[in-house]
Amino acid sequence: MSDAFRLDNYLARIGYRGATEVNLETLEALKASHLDAIPFEALDPFLRRPVRLDPASVVAKLVDSQHGGYCFEQNLLFKAAIETIGFAVTGLAGRVRWMSPPDSPLGPKTHMMLRIDLADGAYLVDVGFGACLLDAPLQLKTDVEQVTAMGTYRLTPSNGLLSLSAKREGGWRTLYVFDLQPQIQADYELGNWFTSTNPSTPLTTRLIMERLAAGKRHRLVDRTLSTEARDGEVITERTLRNSDELSEVMRDTFKVTPPVPAEEIFNKIGD
């Protein structure tokens, strides 16, 4: 992001009025406020609309408008905000494994996350993994279970990479694998182009939205709306029957104003 990044506008967007000291407590609070206010949503890829990562476009969409975004947009925005505050941040990239069989080949780097270096060590921070949003920073330590309010996670060395897994009802499930090689904007532009345009990627073929708020995980996949407690325990689940219900869910549950009428989105599901 540019030097003109308006931190005050971002803090107002996420409703944050707390301290801005460079420490873990501030990082945790900012992350929680961000996840509550700016949901994961991939409406643009689903509608085959361009996803732009230049600073002005990201701010216009996620800060100045009532929209969410997906991993590149979300983490670029969060990176700009905490860098402006004074945090030491490194952009990273990962290979998504959430829907992949354990023995399948690795795919391209289509996910962005952040490394934050604090006085007590390094942390993994990610506000944009829409299949399983991380509710808290995780220490960059391997082979230890890290318990948060919404889940249990662990980082494991795997063939020269780090593998991030979440505990679910059926056992551990891998989110993605990554290394600590710093990435530049061009790396994200390439991953963003592939993820938002290739017909083989989930975000171009399925409607996916997710938000963490008040100790619950709200997720919409196509027409199925679910609410989960920690570790993926499903509390409620229902199928949206029409575009009016979709419009209500986008407005009230996900706080999103869609770029096109809800009827157009609803009718595209399953195409």
Image (tube, grey):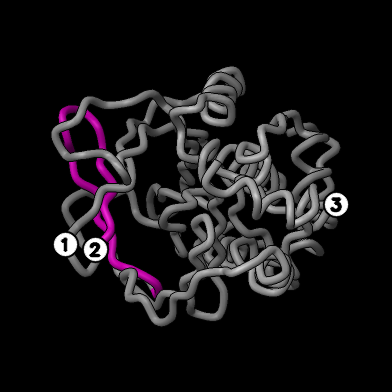
Q: Residue at x 52, y 24 (%)?
A: 198
Instruction: Please state which of residues 63 and 181 is positioned toward the viewer in this rendering.
Output: 63
Evaluate whether residue 1 shows in this view: yes
Indicate whether residue 223 is drawn in magenta. Answer: no
Residue ID for mark 3:
64
Q: Amino acid at mark 2?
A: Lys
Q: Position of residue 234 (x, y in %)?
A: 36, 76
Q: Are marks 3 and 1 in contact (CB under 8 Å)?
A: no
Magenta span: chief secondary structure: strand
Q: Which residues are magenta?
A: 149-166
87 horizontally vs 262: left or right? left
Q: Quadrant of the N terminus?
A: top right
Q: CA distance from mark 3 to mark 1?
A: 40 Å
Point out which mark residue 171 bears: 1
Nearest to the observer: residue 240 or residue 160? 240
Q: Is residue 153 left or right of residue 253?
A: left
Marks 2 & 1, CB-CB < 8 Å contact: yes
Q: Nearer the viewer, residue 59 or 171?
A: 171
Q: Read off the residue under disc 2.
A: 167
Give the mark, 3 or 1, whose residue is nearer the N terminus: 3
Q: CA distance from mark 2 to mark 1?
A: 6 Å
